[in-house]
Image: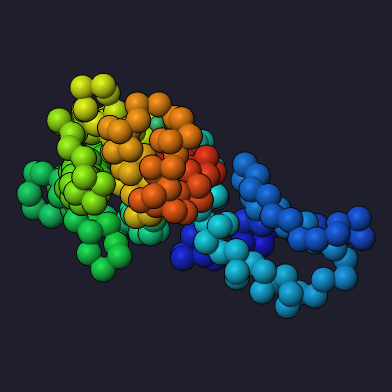
Amino acid sequence: MDQLNISDQMIPYEERRSIRYRRITLSILEDRLRISAPKNISTKQLQKLLTAKQEWILKHWLANQATREPFVRYIEGAHFLYRGNIIKLEIKKHSSQRIRVCLEDQALKVYIPLDLPDKDCSPNIRAALISWYKAQAHKVLKDKLDKHANRMQVTFQTVRLKEQKTRWGSCSSKRNINLNWRIIMAPDEAIDYVIIHELAHLTHLNHSEQFWLRVAAFMPEYANWKKWFKDHGQELKL
Ligand SMILES: [Zn+2]
């Protein structure tokens, strides 16, 4: 099968041509990308579309792979999301017994002990990445929360980072805000939306029309980002 190379990720693909197809459709299957195209589309036109859709293909391919093979992702060259950017994993060995993670030059570098057995690498790297993401979330989300609370002239009691499957944030009647640390993988505007949404609950503890007006007052394009979570929420995982 032919393969597409997107940011060094090899994606097997099959091309189907038929006069029945009215337009080009891309579908992510278990082990390949399927490209269905009308018979009369030129290779050049097809290439142009694939280039334009590269990011979409890569994101959906990785998300799909992630649901199947949890540990295959924690290897050299694997891709991860951080604040909406796709970053590559680089694994390096060092003499310390601790695993260290840092983000440098658009790469997530993980330093592992020289003598770490191969079978322990993936689970250990995954655990180290989760702590790294949580630590970043702590800083970034807290800063954004303070900034937006200031803009919106509201005060909250505490903020806690949580891990929830489907909720991105919540706000209690005691003015405590919970945020899902995984939103740190989403683009900044998506993170801002979750934060503005929760802060708006400090004024309206419901999803009434007034509540949404308040969200819109501080983020007029909020509906795009609300939808973004519907479309991409399942990609925000480790
Ligand atoms: Zn809400």
Q: Position of residue 64 (x, y in %)?
A: 54, 43
Residue in the image at 60% along x and 69% along y: 52
User: Which quarter of the rendering shows the C terminus?
Assistant: top left
Snapshot quadrant of residue 105: bottom left
User: Which quarter of the rendering shows the N terminus?
Assistant: bottom right
Snapshot quadrant of residue 167: top left
Task: Tell which residue pokes out farthest to the left in this image.
Answer: 96
As drawn, 189 above or below 39: above
Regarding ligand 1, which quadrant of the image does it lie in? top left
Residue in the image at 31% along x and 47% along y: 184
Task: Tell which residue pokes out farthest to the top in this image.
Answer: 173
Can residue 48 be seen here? The reply is: yes
The number of discs equals 0
Residue in the image at 56% along x and 64% along y: 54
Q: Foreground: 211 or 187?
A: 211
Can residue 128 be seen here? The reply is: no
As drawn, 202 above or below 83: above
